[in-house]
Amino acid sequence: MVEPVLQISNLVKNFGALRATDGVTLDLRPGEIHALIGPNGAGKSTLIHQICGTLRQDSGSIRFAGEDVGALSVAGRARLGLGRTFQVSSLAPEFSALRNVMLAVQAREGSSFRFFKPVMRDKGLIDTAMAMLERVGLTARARIPAAELSHGERRQLEIAMALALQSRAFLLDEPMAGMGPEGSKSLTRFLDTLRKEAPILLVEHDMDAVFALADRISVLVYGRIIATGTVEEIRRDPAVRTAYLGDHA
Amino acid sequence: MLSRENLVNLVLAATLLAVPLAANALGQPFYVTLATRIAILALAATGLNLALGLGGLVSFGHAAFFGIGGYAAGILATHGFSGDPLIFGLPGTNQMWVIWIVAVVVAGLVGLAIGAISLRTSGVYFIMITLAFAQMVYYFAVSWPAYGGEDGLSILVRNQFPGVMTMRPLSFFLICYVILLIGIGLFALIRASRFGSALQAARQNEVRVATVGIEPYRIRLTGFVISAMMTGLAGALFADLNRFVSPSMLSWHMSGELIVLIILGGTGRLFGPLAGAALYVAFEYALGGLTERWQFFLGLILLVVVLFARGGLLGLLAGKARHG
C-alpha cells in the first residue's frame, strides 16, 4: 500500500471535561480527496487546529510527509508542505493579491531574510506569483488589495498561495461556504483538477460538492469518526444516516 | 514621474537642509542646532518606525536604545578624555565613527535581549513589557554613580570626525543630516525587501504569515533589533549634540515622544518621522516661547491628528499609503 501523506492516529484533545477530539484516526492518501463531514459542534475545527499546529493534541500522533509533526509550529508544518485555506479567508489585507502570493513564493524559497532587493523589481518572484494567480483565474485582479477582493476571489487567492507553497497536501476548510451556486460549481471543477497536484483533505458542509468530489468520506460526530468509506458506503451507512445525513441521502 | 508622496518627501528633505544653511549664512546658529535636533529625533523615530510602522510593534521602550546610544557616546568620550581604560584594557575614544559602531552594536544586543522576551507577548502586554525593560535601564543609569548617576554625564568637547570641524554647528548638522538620509534610505530598502514584506504581513495577519511557513517571531525579532540599532545611533548623535547625556534620555517620556513623532508624521511612512520631528520641534520652539504649558497644545494637536487625520501630516499632504 502507498504510504499516506497525512496519518492521524488516536488523536485526543480535551477542553476541561469536554472531549473535543476522541481518538480520531484518519489518513490522506496520494491523489485522493478525502472529505471530512459532520454536524456543527462535531469537533471539525478543533481537529483542523491540531493538524495545522495552532492547537497541540493531548495524545495520539500526527504524521505528515513521513515525519511526526506533533511538536512542530504552524510555520514548520507549512514548510513541510501543508497548504491550507480558511473558513473565513485569512490574507494580508493591505497587500495586493500579487504581493500575497509573492509572500508565499518567498516563504517557499526560504528567503525572507533578504533586506535590500526590492520585491517589486524581483522579476523571478513576480513571474512565479503571477503564474499561480493565472492558475486560479485572478490575473486581472493581481494589483487589487486583498481587502477589496470579493469573497470568492479571496478564496481563489488563498488557493493560489497554497499552490505557490508547492504543497504536498491541501487542507481546505469549508471552501464552498458563502460561494453561491455558480461559484460552488466552478470551485468544484477547480478542486477536481487540484487533486492532481496534491491530495486534499476537504472539510465541507456542501453535500453536493462532497459527493461530487470525494474519493472517501469520514464522518465526525461528537469528536469521533463514526464511519469512513466511499461515497456509496457512507450514503448507505445507517449510523451516518441517523446521526447526520437524515433525509438528505 | 514623481509621485505626490515623493514630492512631499523631497520638499521636506530640501527644507531641512536649506533652513540651517540659510541660518548659518545669516549668523543664526541657534536655528542650525534646532535643525540638528530635528534630524536626530527623526532618525530615532525612523528606527522606531521600523518596529512600529512596519511591524506593528508598539514599543514603549525605545528610549532604552536611544539612551544606550547616548551613554555609549558619553562613556567612551569620558574614557577617551581621561585616558583610563574602559574594559579589558581597551581605551575610550573621541572618534565618532567608533562611537557609532559601539552604540549600534550595544543597542542591537540589548534590543535582542529585550525583544526576545517581549515578543513572546503582544498587544497591551507588549507595550507594558517594553516599558518595564526601559524603566529598568533607566533606574540602572540613575543608580550607577560611576557615570554621573542622576546628574548625567558631560562630554567636554564634542567628539571628532575625520576632516570635519564637529564643533561648528553647521558641520555637525551636516553629519546628522547625511546619517538621517542614510537611515531613511535603509528604511526604504528594508520596507521594499522580502524581509520587509514578511514584517508588514506579520503586522497585517500573523496567522497568514505562519501559514505560508514563515515564523512571525523571528521576523519580528529581527525587525526589532534593526529598529533598536537605528534608534541607538540617533542616541549617540543626540549626546554629541547636547554634549551631555543623562537618564532623561532613557525615561518613558522619551519613548512616548518618539511614538508621538511617528503618529504626528504618519505611521509607517518613509518621511513620517521627519515630518513629525519637524512639527514637534517647531511647536516646542514656537509655543514654548509663549507658554510653559506648550505640551497642552501639543496634546490638543495630537488629539486632532488621531481623531481626524489618522495618516498624520504625510497622510494629509500625500494621501493614503499604497502597497504594490
Image (spheres, coloured by chain):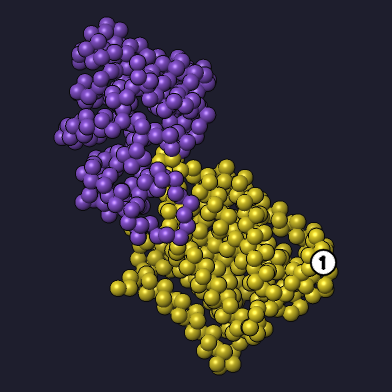
Q: Could you tell me residue B48's position as x and y percent?
A: 54, 60
Q: Residue B35: x percent and y percent?
A: 56, 79
In the rendered image, which quarter is residue A196 located in? top left
The residue under label 1 is B85
Check the image and name the residue furthest to the left: A182
Question: A119 or B53, which lies in front?
Answer: A119
So how many labels did they put on this image?
A: 1
The local crowd at label 1, few if under 14, some if 14 to 19, many if 20 or more residues have their Cα within 10 Å, is: few
Chain letter for the yellow colouring in the rendering: B
Residue B302 seen in the current view: no
Describe residue A155's horizontal placement relative to residue A180 as left or right: right
Looking at the rendering, in which quadrant would you find the N terminus of chain B?
A: bottom left
Q: Chain drawn purple, letter?
A: A
Q: Quadrant of the C terminus of chain B?
A: bottom left
Q: Which residue occupies 65% across, 60% down?
A: B105
Query: At 52% from the left edge and 89% from the top edge, which residue is drawn?
Result: B22
Which kind of residue does numbered mark 1 sit on? Pro
Q: Position of residue B177 (x, y in %)?
A: 54, 76
